Image (tube, rainbow, N blue to C red):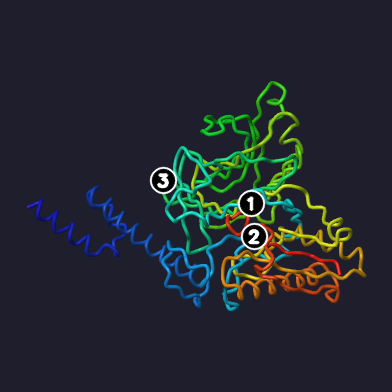
Amino acid sequence: MKAILRSILMLLLFGLVINVSAQIINVPNRIQNKVVNRINNKIDRGIDKGLDAVEDSLKGNNKKSTTPANQKTDPKTTGTTGATGTTGTTAGNKGDAKQDQPSLQSYSKYDFIPGEKVVFYEDFSQDAIGDFPALWNTNGSAEVVTTNLFPGQWMKFVTREAIWTDALLKLPDNYTVEFDVIPVKGEEGNGMAGWSMRLMQAKNVKAFDYGSAPGQGGYLFNVAYYGRPDYSTWLYGSECDQLKTGGSKEGEDVKEKINQKYHIAIWVQKTRVRLYQDQNKLFDTPKAFPTGCVKPDRLRFEEGAAMISNIRIAVGAPDMRNKLMTEGKLVTYGIYFDVNKDVVKPESYGTLKEIAAILNEVPDVKVKIVGHTDSDGADAANLDLSKRRAASVKNELAKSFNVNADRLVTDGMGETQPVAPNDTPANKALNRRVEFIKL
């Protein structure tokens, strides 16, 4: 009889699961746990559904696409899934929903200026969805994915291992490293797992360098599972080891959150390393790479869960004044746009500020601003996009930096004047540029 009553009780409880309250405490433990789990699952599904609806509304309900999330579109008809930066120059409708981003003025303390010549660029556009990316190596796993939240293709890893640039990087004393990152759910639970990046000198050129201080030394940037960023350096040799350093950054405004995109920029000037996250300069370390102690040649991601894209490494501090005033032409890669957009991204602030300072010092000089794209997308759409981007640069210089707009004229060349073949992501990145020509 007790068994029958227990069976009836179980059926009643499953039928009334939504209304179950504190009385669960009187149910046998096995049933109680089952009911609680089912309630939690339904609550989680409800929360997820609500969050999805909010995200969809923020992205704009007027975007209609029948393309599956994991399928690349035809770049000649609908636009590539390319990266951010002076990138994503393919065809797009003028009526695209306005991008959700901070204002340019929110970056008023952002002094980062990217290197002049791109030596490495990776947006994973050459890789098939689901594959491990061709230019990388790993002792764990990663795959190329797309996401409904952000355009382009991303390298996603959920691992306790590492993924690194397969070929060694040839880096001089001065260079910049930039990439976009989206922290995602880890192997356990539903929360963020954190992630780590190393700019390091490899010991094993074609293999994994093991240990908590791998290779010949380097710079580690780490984001904890609860979002706090920190850094440390590791160096070898009795003298160098004493010079290692580290620190962390507190504050809710710099903590990373799950499923949000962040732009990381690293500026190396000989021994000095500055690291920025969006508009915030997180760390400025004068002796991060002491002379003779370490010379990084590899970028490595590890220990956590994240999606990475739009990796750009460039060398040489741009001599903007000499290029524009003496040579009469300044080519810049430090003015950024999202895919198919003509809105200047706020991380362009440092470059625009420097150009504006030059222009405001010589008020009689007139300049033509010319936009250029790569060859992805329709020719006519690329031409139109390049013209609109040049006009946006003019507007920002006038509005945000008080440059006299009457001195600035704009034009766009689309894909008609490449400086490199449009055959690799790195070469396409060279073609996506903004030029300032002295008139």
Amino acid bearing label 2:
Gly
Residue 312 badge: 1
Secondary structure beneath disc 2? loop
Which residue is the extreme one toward the left?
A: 1
Among the two numbered marks 1 and 3 on one chain, the one whose residue lies closer to the N terminus? 3
Residue 241 in picture, x, y percent from top left: 68, 26
Secondary structure beneath disc 1? strand
Residue 129 in picture, x, y percent from top left: 44, 56
Query: Residue at horizontal 80%, vertical 74%?
Result: 409
User: What residue is shown with label 3?
Assistant: 188
Residue 108 badge: none
109 to 68, vertically: above or below? above
Q: Nearer the viewer, mark 3 or mark 2?
A: 2
Secondary structure beneath disc 3? loop
Query: Residue at horizontal 63%, vertical 55%?
Result: 427
Residue 85 badge: 2
Q: Nearer the viewer, mark 1 or mark 3?
A: 1
Among the two numbered marks 3 and 2 on one chain, the one whose residue lies closer to the N terminus? 2
Q: CA distance from mark 3 to mark 2?
A: 33 Å
Q: CA distance from mark 1 to mark 3?
A: 31 Å
The answer to whether residue 48 is left or right of residue 109 is left
